Image (cartoon, rainbow, N blue to C red):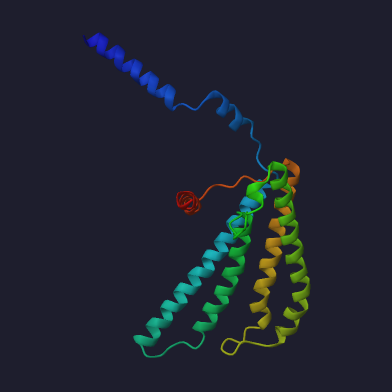
Amino acid sequence: MNDNDTGSEKSEADDAFMDSAPPASNASESSSEKPLPLATCVRWMVLGEKTVAGLFLLVIVSTMAAQVVARYVFGAPFQWSEEVARLALIWMTFISAAFVMAEGRHIAVDIISSRVGDGGKLFIECMSYVVVAVTCLLLLIGGANFVWYVGKVGSPALGVPKSWWYGAGMVGLLLMSVHSLVNLFQVWMTGKPIPREPHVEEEAFQLDMEQSE
């Protein structure tokens, strides 16, 4: 009885292991997949942008917390805290727009791309990257003179040149154009749209849309 029980337990364990193991075809497909061109460079760029944006967020939170303590505890509010928080918010916004662009998380309307084949999706994705890159570069070139012109004007409290304020937009446009061109290069070299990792909120939204239909 013990031998039979032991043999049955081993067979059940082997069956469970075989069921949980991935198919051989999937394993071969995953091993044959090649990384995207410039994937390491993009990964480091995104990591740096997220780090800088996180530091700006830390500056905003710490500055506002110090202002609350100074105003309501010591009765002597800072004159510069609002400008520091506003400047950090501007830079955080445009830096965040860059890595959101790299991850394909910007708001997009996929009415057409969801109804065409693989070739149509590839063409639409390439055109979107071209439009974004050209638009960002045109805005960057057109706004450079304005940023240089307002550099003579300083902020009221800190005296920071206005070029530091509007320069955040220039840096964000430059980074977004670079990410768009890199994405276009990756699509061109691989011949297929860039695979994106699904996110929890997107899957939940898609499930709600399917249930409502």
x and y percentages locating residue 12 in the rendered image: 34, 19
Quadrant of the rendered image containing residue 25: top right
Q: Position of residue 182 (x, y in %)?
A: 71, 52
Answer above or below: position of 188 versus 180. above
Q: Give the camera-side residue of 173 and 61.
A: 173
Residue 200 percent across, percent down from the top left = 47, 51
- Tell which of 213 and 130 is nearer to you: 213
Q: Residue at x 38, y 23 (%)?
A: 16
Q: Is residue 102 left or right of residue 6?
A: right
Question: What residue is shown at x 39% (from left), y 85% (from top)?
Answer: 70
Q: Residue at x 71, y 61 (%)?
A: 132
Q: Is residue 211 above or below residue 94?
A: above
- Which residue is outermost to the left? 1
Q: Judge whether 42 appears above or below 160 on screen.
A: above
Count of labels shown? 0
Vertical arrangement, residue 213 with respect to residue 174, above or below = above
Is residue 198 found left or right of 153 in the rendered image?
left
Across and down, in percent, residue 137 comes to 76, 66
Examine the image and state in which quarter residue 34 appears.
top right
- Residue at left offset 45%, top offset 49%: 211
Q: Quadrant of the N terminus?
A: top left
Q: Is residue 100 left or right of residue 2?
A: right
Res 64 → quadrant? bottom left
